[in-house]
Image (tube, helix red, strand yellow):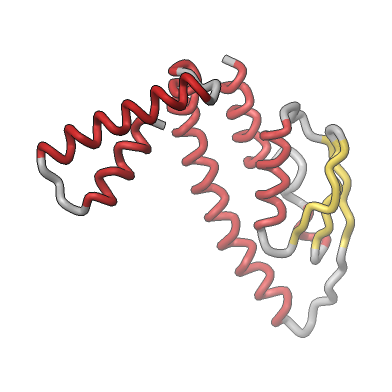
Amino acid sequence: MFLLFFLLWIIFAANITPEICIFGFLIAAALFFFLCKCMDYSIKKEVSLYKRLGLFLRYLSLLIGEIIKANLTTIKLILSQKEEIEPALVTFETSLTTAVGKTLLADAITLTPGTITVSVDEATFQVHCLDKDLAQGLTDSAFEKLAKKLEDKEEE
């Protein structure tokens, strides 16, 4: 959070001078101290966020790539006259245990065109797919593996 506060200060300042950087550093430190003191935040949580940042960026890049591929597949499916679209309602189990992990997986499924998360009950996901072929990558997906790694890093 300290780094975020400092970067926001630099962005909003528009000019970068040593005085502005020093003042921004002090303001960011004061805000971070307030956050730690009054909002139950700690340097331990800050370090944990930095440890997971690389995994989260990998997750975002995977998500963007999958959204692009799913868009092209969905466009092809809609525009093709010869194929019959067969919607499917798929239920599968996940190994994710935390609410954050399950939310990341459900959001990734819903953000990918052609699929939508209908319900999440404990470890069971129910997903509606525009076509049964879109359901192939749902179980044991790369999204789930990265979300599991993020969960594991959170527990450390």
The percent position of residue 53, horizontal first and vertical second, equals 46, 33
The residue lying at 59 percent from left, 22 percent from top is: 154
Hey, which quadrant is residue 83 in on the image? bottom right
In front here: 72 or 109? 109
Q: Quadrant of the N terminus?
A: top left
Say above or below: 1 vs 126. above
The percent position of residue 49, horizontal first and vertical second, equals 48, 27
Q: How many marks?
A: 0
The residue lying at 25 percent from left, 45 percent from top is: 10
Say above or below: 24 vs 48. below
Say above or below: 92 vs 123. below
The percent position of residue 12, horizontal first and vertical second, equals 28, 51
Q: Quadrant of the C terminus?
A: top right
The residue lying at 87 percent from left, 38 percent from top is: 121
The percent position of residue 102, horizontal first and vertical second, equals 73, 37
Lateral position of residue 139 relative to residue 72, left or right: right
Lateral position of residue 21 relative to residue 145, left or right: left
Lateral position of residue 36 relative to residue 137, left or right: left
Say above or below: 26 vs 124. above
The residue lying at 23 percent from left, 50 percent from top is: 13
